[in-house]
Image (tube, helix red, strand yellow):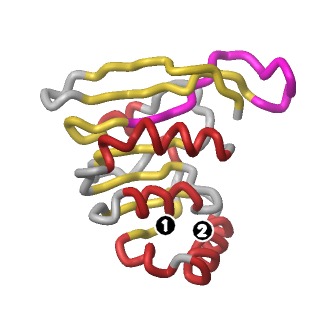
Amino acid sequence: SSPHIHVWAAELLTDHLESAQACLDVGSGSGYFTAMLQHLAPQARVIGLECHEELIETSLIALQKHYPHLLHNMEFIPGMGEQGCPGKTFDAIHVGFMCKEIPNALVDQLAPGGRMLVPVWDGKHSSFDKRCLSGYYTCVDKSLTGEIQVTKLFMCSF
């Protein structure tokens, strides 16, 4: 994700991070946003889920060198993003790649009162770069009673 998307995500998740017990960064890439989640929610268990194991290794090396204090309650695990971490629930979920649709598995893993941010493809390619997919940065909120509210926030490209 681009730095401006990380800023938006941090802002949109702020209220949920204050009391979060578990956070998931799907498609954690360099580990930058995973580290941001840990910094913003030091009380939470933070998981970075990444399908490219070499990125996990790179993330761990960088974090051990520059921010070792963040690693005490953080882990990176290999896996396919849209499946999330079956059997676990999260108060905040950040998805760092364009999805064809909102992943049901991730909605299921969203804790009551939780929020997920996910870019969702609109079936088009970006007007400025045909290699990028165009879509909507989407907010998925789960009420305390389990009701789902989906809000398209703004256009984005990944």
Circle 1 packing at 10 Å, graded few (<14), some (14-19), many (20+), is many
Residue 116 higher or lower than 20, as above or below: above
- Residue for point 22% across, 36% down: 113
Amino acid, disc 1: Phe
Quarter occupied by the N terminus: top right
Residue 135 higher or lower than 132, as above or below: above
Left or right? Give the position of 130 relative to 136: right
- Give whichever of 86, 145 is nearer the camera: 145
Left or right? Give the position of 32 relative to 142: right
Q: Which stretch appears magenta?
A: 116-132
Q: Secondary structure at mark 2?
A: helix
Q: x, y (%) of residue 158?
A: 70, 35
Asked if the residue under mark 2 is in contact with the one under mark 1, i.e. CB atoms within 8 Å, the reply is yes
The verdict on residue 47 being magenta is no
**C-alpha separation, residue under disc 1 versus residue under disc 2:** 6 Å
Left or right? Give the position of 94 relative to 63: left
- Residue for point 66% across, 72% down: 58
Q: x, y (%) of residue 72?
A: 38, 78
Residue 10 higher or lower than 132, as above or below: below
Q: Secondary structure at mark 1?
A: strand
- Residue for point 68% across, 69% down: 54
Q: Quadrant of residue 98?
A: top right
Tell me, for residue 76, which label it has, or none.
1
Q: x, y (%) of residue 42?
A: 33, 65
- Residue for point 49% across, 25% down: 138
The verdict on residue 123 being magenta is yes
> Circle 2 is placed at which residue position?
56
Amino acid, disc 2: Ile
Circle 2 packing at 10 Å, graded few (<14), some (14-19), many (20+), is many
Residue 55 higher or lower than 71, as above or below: above
Q: Looking at this rendering, what residue extends furthest in the left direction?
A: 145
Of callouts 1 and 2, which one flags the residue occurring earlier in the amino acid sequence? 2
